[in-house]
């Protein structure tokens, strides 16, 4: 029985996702890079949000909700997947897009994720601030009150860290899934590597590893904020996730490892090294990364190899959290080549 089986959930993701060797870059780097393909979870181009939404929407259905409200950046994978999940389950949906990236690029605002959101017919609101999670959530709750006054039953999926992190349960479950795959393939990786942004995926994996008593280092590569701030966020979310369980072995605070070497110049903006990482992976192994999350986290992984943290000949698991549609929002990936 899964650690999370007692919690309400709905079926959205294709599981288990594959665990496969990235053959050519593994040969180039001398480290065996295994990829947990959570870009293959289905649900309108997939990604890690499909697993998280299984538990958020499980709560919504249990509460009798007839519609979903959520918020995210213009190129939010979470927003895209929330709309897809609502359509799959026959729920109405409204989303709020925040101005997090300072660009007027037509491609950024109209291609990739927002294009797919429009394709699926979601009601879209715009929020002019990009770095105030509490204010973004407050706007959602105000909209929810207006909808309730007209007889609707909305469920808000919030952004800030102050709320119950139901989505992190998806990655407590994913940790169990990945450990089972490793066991069946007789793999003993020295580490896992994942993008660390909202912290639900990072925290969920750490809680799952600790609960399963698995001695594997997990490196969270910062994509939203610097390492010190991200470490505090992950630890706070771990404490919140642990409280959802009656009895579970939590990780130790020193196990929270955040690396911000690939974060600059900021959220949703590529450095040249991140752009080159995206191109390198696409052209060597045919795997697509995105500029905001996975190209940065893979650049961080390569940095861990280059500085000797991940030793030659060792195995490492890279958790591919998806985000593929966003490549269409950044035509400069190719035009600067």
Image: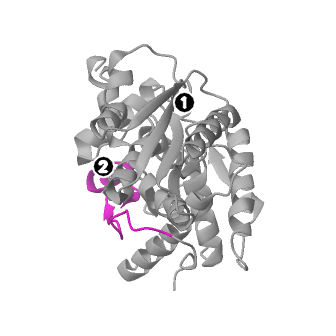
Label 2: which residue? Answer: 44
| Left or right of 67, for residue 108 | left
**Residue in the image at 34% along x and 51% along y:** 87
Label 1: which residue? Answer: 267
Q: Which residues are magenta?
A: 9-36
The reply to whether the magenta stretch includes residue 29 is: yes
> Is the residue 203 above or below the residue 328 in the image?
below
> Is the residue 139 above or below the residue 152 in the image?
above
Viewer-side residue, 63 vs 26: 63
The reply to whether the magenta stretch includes residue 287 is: no
Tell us which disc is closer to us: 1 or 2: 2
Q: Position of residue 65 (x, y in %)?
A: 51, 57
| Left or right of 251, for residue 260 | left
In the rendered image, which quarter is residue 223 located in? top right
How packed mark 1 is, by other alpha carbons closer than 10 Å (few <14, some 14-19, many 20 or more), is: some
**Residue in the image at 72% along x and 60% along y:** 240
How packed mark 2 is, by other alpha carbons closer than 10 Å (few <14, some 14-19, many 20 or more), is: some
Q: Position of residue 179 (x, y in %)?
A: 48, 75
**Which numbered disc, 1 or 2, marks the residue that appears first in the sequence?**
2
Viewer-side residue, 310 vs 113: 113
**SS label for mark 1:** loop
In the rendered image, which quarter is residue 165 located in? bottom right
Q: Looking at this rendering, what residue extends furthest in the front direction?
A: 150
**Residue in the image at 67% along x and 57% along y:** 164
Q: Which label sits on residue 305?
A: none
**SS label for mark 2:** loop
Image quadrant in which the C terminus is located: top left
In the rendered image, which quarter is residue 241 located in? bottom right
Give the spatial CA distance, label 1 vs label 2: 23 Å
Instruction: Give the number of callouts.
Output: 2
Viewer-side residue, 113 vs 34: 113
């Amino acid at each position: 029985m899964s650690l999370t089986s007692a919690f309400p959930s709905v079926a959205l993701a294709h599981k288990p996702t594959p665990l496969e060797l990235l053959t050519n870059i593994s040969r180039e780097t001398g480290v065996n890079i295994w990829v947990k393909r959570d870009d293959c979870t289905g649900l309108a181009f997939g990604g890690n949000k499909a697993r998280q939404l299984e538990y958020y929407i499980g709560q919504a259905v249990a509460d009798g909700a007839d519609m979903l409200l959520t918020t995210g950046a213009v190129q939010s994978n979470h927003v895209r997947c929330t709309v897809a999940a609502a359509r799959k389950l026959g729920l109405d949906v409204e989303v709020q897009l925040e101005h997090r990236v300072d660009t007027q690029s037509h491609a950024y605002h109209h291609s990739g994720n927002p294009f797919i959101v429009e394709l699926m017919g979601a009601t879209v609101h715009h929020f002019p601030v990009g770095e105030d999670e509490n204010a973004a959530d407050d706007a959602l709750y105000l909209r929810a009150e207006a909808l309730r006054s007209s007889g609707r039953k909305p469920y808000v999926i919030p952004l800030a860290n102050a709320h119950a992190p139901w989505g992190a349960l998806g990655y407590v479950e994913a940790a169990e899934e990945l450990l089972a795959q490793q066991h069946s393939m007789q793999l003993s990786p020295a580490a896992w590597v994942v993008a660390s942004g909202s912290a639900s995926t990072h925290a969920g994996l750490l809680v799952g590893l600790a609960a399963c008593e698995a001695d594997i280092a997990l490196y969270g590569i910062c994509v939203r904020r610097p390492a010190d701030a991200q470490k505090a966020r992950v630890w706070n979310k771990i404490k919140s996730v642990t409280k959802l369980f009656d009895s579970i072995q939590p990780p130790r605070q020193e196990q929270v490892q955040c690396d911000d070497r690939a974060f600059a110049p900021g959220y949703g903006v590529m450095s040249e090294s991140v752009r080159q990482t995206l191109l390198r992976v696409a052209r060597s192994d045919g795997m697509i990364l995105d500029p905001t999350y996975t190209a940065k986290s893979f650049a961080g992984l390569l940095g861990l190899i280059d500085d000797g943290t991940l030793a030659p000949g060792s195995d490492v698991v890279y958790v591919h959290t998806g985000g593929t549609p966003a490549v269409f929002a950044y035509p400069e990936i190719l035009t600067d080549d």
